[in-house]
Image (cartoon, rainbow, N blue to C red):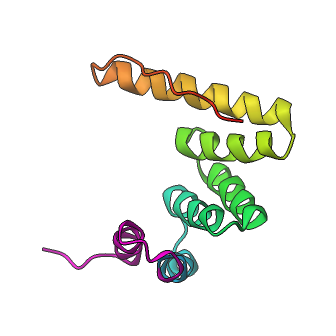
Amino acid sequence: MPDKTKHQIALDLLNQNHIHEASRLLTEALAEQESCDLWNDWATVKAACNEINEARRGFERALVLDTENAQAQFNLGLILVNQNELDRGFSLLQKSALRLGKEEQAAGQPAARAPVQI
């Protein structure tokens, strides 16, 4: 079995509610090699730590690396709506919902409707 990456260890730490340790490992992993998923997870941790501007920066970078990533679109969309940037925020939320619905249909699952909390 291969050794776990820093990203994988950080996700394990998150599941154990060790947010600050996970944040440190995700930052180290980003310094080594960035990816959309890594930026999205880093930004999610920043949001959990109430570092919203850092979270926004991370989600923005994730979307630079993969403009079609539905999870990053959704996460950034929530932040933008919360910051009253409604046009772009709702646009991203709509794109992510459509993309996630198509992915579920491709997997043979009915599209789920997720409530949007503002």
At a point 65% along the width and 25% down the height, the residue shown is 94
State which quarter of the image contains the N terminus. bottom left
At a point 84% along the width and 47% down the height, the residue shown is 83
Magenta residues span 1-21
Q: Is residue 27 left or right of residue 17?
A: right
Determine if the magenta segment contains residue 117.
no
At a point 54% along the width and 77% down the height, the residue shown is 23
Image position of 21 with respect to 54: above or below:
below
Q: Position of residue 103 (x, y in %)?
A: 40, 27
Taking the image as drawn, is residue 48 in sight? yes
Depth check: give the residue in front, 111 or 33. 111
Image position of 48 with respect to 86: above or below:
below
Determine if the magenta segment contains residue 8.
yes
Image position of 25 with respect to 113: above or below:
below
Q: Is residue 52 left or right of residue 33?
A: right
Task: Name the image quarter holding residue 118.
Answer: top right
At a point 49% along the width and 57% down the height, the residue shown is 37
Task: Name the image quarter holding residue 91.
Answer: top right
Task: Name the image quarter holding residue 42.
Answer: bottom right
Q: Position of residue 113 (x, y in %)?
A: 49, 21
Question: Tag count in the figure?
Answer: 0
Taking the image as drawn, is residue 67 in sight? no
Q: From this viewpoint, which residue is outermost toward the left?
A: 1
Q: Position of residue 65 (x, y in %)?
A: 61, 53
